[in-house]
Every structure is written in C-alpha cells, then in structure tokens.
Amino acid sequence: MFMTKIKTAAMAALLAACTLAGAQPATTYLGPLQGENHRQKGYAYQGMDAWDKTVVSLQNQGIATVYKRTEEGIAILGQFHLGSFHPYNHANVASFGPWKGACSDPLPLLYVSHCHKKSIQGFKDVCFVERIHPDYQGSTLVQTIVYDDLSGDFGYALQWVVDRKRKRLIGYGNTVNNSDPSNRHRVIVFRLPKPSDGETVILKKEDALENYTIEAVSGYRFNPIGQGLFIHNNQLYMPTGLGTAEHPSILYIWDLRAKKMRDIPLGAVTTGELEDISFTKGRILLQGQDGLWEIKANAL
C-alpha cells in the first residue's frame, strides 16, 4: 500500500490560486495523482467514480486504480486490469450502478464506456459492466451492453452514464464530431439492464425511453470536447475542455427534465485536460490529467 501526501508546497500554491469566481469557496486540490504509485507510464487518466471515500480511477485500455481518501492523503488499495482490458477500450467514463455483484462486495458494479472508434469483438458503443473484487486486486466482466446504432445516431463514439436513482442507462455523444459545424449532441435513455438480463444485452433504437439532441429540444448551441459524465438530482454533469484559451474548461449541466443547460467556467479552479466527474458527501470530484480536484457542490 502506498500513501501520497497532499500537503506540499505545490499544492499550497495552487490552493492559493484556485478560487471560484466571486465569494464562492475555494477548491481543494487532492493531487497530483500521477506517478509511480498511480498512473502507469504511457496511459492517460480517463474515467473515475467515487463511492463514499473509495475512488476508482481508470486509465485508457482499462487500467484501474482503487484508492481511499484519508486525512493524511490517498491510500492506494489496488491496481489491476479490468476484465474488459483491451487496446481499443478507452475507458472514458466510469459510473457506479445501483446493484452489487454480491451482497458482501464493498463496491457496486462499475459501468465503463468503451468510447473508441474501433470495435471490440465486433461490438462498438459498448458499456462494460465490471464487478470489482472485494480485495481490490482485480475485476470480472459480468455484462456487456451494446447500442445497435443502425441509424447512425452517434459519430465517433458514445459515452454511457448510470442514473442510479431512476435505474436508467443514458448515452451521450456527438452526432458527427467536434470539428463539424453541423454536429449536434444526442441524449438517449434506456432502462438500465439488470445483471440477470444476460452476459450480452443489445439495445435497439426502439427500446429507448427518450432520444433527442440537446440543440433540437432547447436551442442551446455548443461544441466542446466531451469528457466525463455524472448524474445527480436529474442533472447531467459534463466536464469539458483542455484548460487552454482555445479549449477552455467548462462544466455543462443539462437538466434532464426541464431540458435546459447551465455552463460554469472551471478555468479558475482546474488546470489541464479534464476527464471525469463524481459526487460524494456533498463534494464534486473532478479528475483530469493534472490530478484530482474537490469542489463543494453548493459552490456551483
């Protein structure tokens, strides 16, 4: 087990600089998480989700690190390849579901977005469902969920996120790509398949509970570089951007019921490319290539 101390001069300097606009509270910088104790060389950070104080951080191809946040820092509990580990698994979004693989498991099933232009075993737009072992030393692929996109609803790739409260599986992505002015952003909603529904579940367009583009139902126009997803209180949270002037970091919040958008600049509280987002204990966690940030949820 390794411990990464967070009380460093670099952290203190960043804390001083990282304040939200106006009178909003300062963010807490929990990184850097890079290094020999966490990120494997040559593999970028991707999906992330939190369950209480336990966090699962993914890297591309499906490398998972499980760690626990403590008062002293970050305790690494285990690092392993997911059951869905593959060169074409971008592991772009991680999302805990409402069910566990076994009642005694410390963590629920984890839903991982394939999110790659190339297929795996003939499947594209896949959501891999992983059961993380109780000792945090591995995981087992227990279900593969596929959207059969015969209509070409999505362009490069499709991201998945679980709405635990309503037991919904929500897909989100470009209709074309970020560089095309005709691009739109599609949201498609399905009933979340149960683990008992089988090892492979094929979702078809006619199975969708909702299927629309954000632009069509709201008139809101945007074209960011999409990253992670999280659902909280019927709001779809979407961190975006590279932390640059050309691609600024912005948190988009899409109201799934009212079909309205909010956008919050994050350039004052984060740096670098953002990857995924989670909520835990009234806090928002943001994972990016520069580390992990914590923001009070009521600050947004």
Image (cartoon, helix red, strand yellow):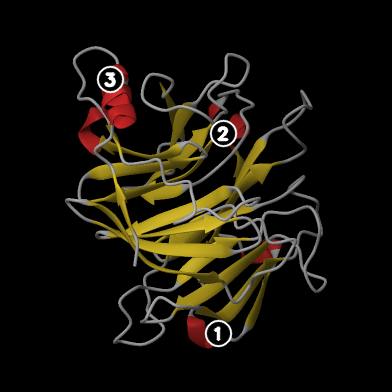
Residue ID for mark 2 = 217
Q: Residues within 10 Å of mark 2 (few under 14, many from 20)?
A: few
> Number of callouts in the render?
3
In terms of secondary structure, where does tag 2 sit? helix
Disc sitting over residue 297 in the figure: none
Q: Residues within 10 Å of mark 3 (few under 14, many from 20)?
A: many
Q: Earlier in the sequence, mark 1 or mark 2?
A: 1
Callout 2–callout 3 Cβ contact below 8 Å: no
Mark 1 Cα-neighbour bin, 10 Å: few <14, some 14–19, many ≥20: few
Q: Secondary structure at mark 1?
A: helix
Q: Which residue is mark 3?
A: 19
- Amino acid type of the residue tagged 1 in the rendering: Asp
Q: Amino acid at mark 3?
A: Thr
Residue at point 57%, 28% (across, down): 242
Q: Which residue is mark 1?
A: 197
What residue is drawn where x is 76% and y is 59%? Answer: 149
Among the 4 quarters of the image, the one containing residue 135:
bottom left
Q: Quadrant of the C terminus?
A: top left
Residue at left offset 36%, top offset 82%: 134
Cα–Cα gap, marks 1 and 2:
32 Å
Q: Earlier in the sequence, mark 3 or mark 1?
A: 3
Locate residue 113, reporting x and y percent: 60, 59
Amino acid type of the residue that numbered disc 2 sits on in the rendered structure: Val
- The numbered mark, 2 or 3, whose residue comes first in the sequence reads 3
In whole angstroms, how far apart are the C-alphas of marks 3 and 1?
46 Å
Task: Name the one closer to the observer, 135 or 92.
Answer: 135
Q: Is residue 271 visible?
A: yes
Looking at the rendered image, the disc whose residue lies closer to the viewer, 3 or 1, is 3
Observer-side mark, 2 or 3, equals: 3
Q: Is residue 104 above or below residue 226?
A: below
